[in-house]
Amino acid sequence: MPELFDPALTKTLKKDKQYLENTKLPIITVSGTYQEDLKRMHGLPDDNTIQDIVFSRAHYSMAVGVACQAWGDEQDPKKAWVADPTNYVAADDWFSIKLTDKVGQTIARHPFLKTIKDLIDRFGRQKLPILNSITQPLLYLTENIQQPILSLHIATGNILVGQGKTVLQVITDPHVRYDYVTYADQPNLYYCVFDENTKLELLEKAALQQKDIDANRIFVTGPPIDPRIIAARIKKQPWRSGLLKLVLTTGGLGTNKTEIEQLLQQFLPNLRKQKPSIKLVIYAGTHLDIANMVREMSTAHRVKIGENYDKSAQLRLLYHPQIVDANELLIKYAFPWAHGFITKPSGDMAYDAVAAGCFLLTLREWGEWEHRIREIFEQQDISRRATLDHIMTQLSVLQSARGTAQSWVEAAMHHALRVDKLYLTGAKNIISAHQKIQ
């Protein structure tokens, strides 16, 4: 067992290990830390103000989404449990976690540094320094698990397959990194993939690496989306007239901060008007610098930030220093409310927004997989690229009816509400796939 800097985490580690060993659906991911919420979940005192380290909302929200599908109305560790070994990195290795977080955030806020990230991606996630740090707690958490383990991150999947564990690996995007085929020829590895095209790409890349993969071990499931987000589409009505309700979002690392600032410079004057044309919710996630930027800019433009629950407010800000709470704010106040999302086309936010019946305007992509996600939703006429320099003009055009036809905004929302059911049943399908390989 790793030696941890916080004695309370030793207790939660043992409890997480016990839950994983006794649950029907053990889920492992790598998203960051939510240590204070772990204390709360396990009945220990917690501090709701301590800052989490977050690498990815996607890997957290997707794992929790599958768990929520298994749980139903009430969290039940016998049905499913999620663990992230990042929470249990040994005290001696903690510096590598903080360094990875700091480097990631710096790159996310400075587009010219993205070339460094692209270089990292080229060599694969297996080379990242965090992987050595999470291996010991991961192996401790899973050492006694006998049934298949659902992995929502390629790093955990590869480590566990290499240890002889049976793994159901979720490829969460319509894009296959070569890391995914490292153990593709091993009989203890199964896959869940985004769609048929992703399955073909997986088979192709395995063949190129001389890996003899069994196609019967690949399940086409669709993306894992939290059922609470999908429920938001039930009462969603496509926009036809009136105020347009928009959500502007960042990602787990605080990505697209400069673009968010550029858009706010144009949105805030409109929000200050006597008759504005939009309402805006900004999701800053766990990033205090982005939240403070929004507060400072809104003050400068004399636009009041309303309370989270106030749907009449012209501007609201969703921020919390901890990922569990930040994600819950997004699910409660953004997806059910919005007509459209302005976001990078990421594997969590884009899927989630479409599943909630919203249109997309996309920011700068953050990798090959996001280019593919953007293309998929553009082809379905649900998404367009945001015009950063003239966003209000773009929105005006997209809201204008084309003769007797619908506006693009209304049509895009109708398309989102009629999206292929594969985009809505991923969590259910993944659970079914897990049951098939018992």
Image: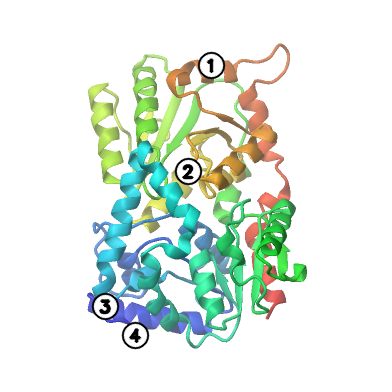
State the residue position of label 1.
Answer: 396
Which of discs 2 and 3 lies nearer the camera? The answer is: 2
Res 261 seen here: yes
Residue 18, picture quadrant? bottom left
Q: Left of 242 or right of it: where is 357?
A: right
Q: Contact, CB < 8 Å: mark 3 with mark 1?
A: no
Q: Residue at 39% of width from left, 23% of height from top?
A: 267
Mark 3 vs 1, N-terminal side: 3
Residue 268, picture quadrant? top left
| Residue type (three-letter) at the residue carrying disc 1 | Ser
Cα separation between marks 4 and 2: 36 Å
Q: Residue at 38% of width from left, 20% of height from top?
A: 266
Q: Left of 55 or right of it: where is 417?
A: right
Mark 4 vs 2, N-terminal side: 4
Q: Position of residue 320 (x, y in %)?
A: 32, 50
Cα separation between marks 4 and 1: 58 Å
Q: Residue furthest right?
A: 216
State the residue position of label 4.
Answer: 1
Q: Left of 415 or right of it: where is 262?
A: left
Q: Position of residue 150 (x, y in %)?
A: 57, 71
Mark 4 vs 1, N-terminal side: 4
State the residue position of label 3.
Answer: 4
Disc 4 crowd, CA 10 A, few/some/many (<14, 14-19, 20+): some
Look at the picture and state if 118 lies above or below 393.
below
State the residue position of label 2.
Answer: 366
Q: SS for tag 2?
A: loop
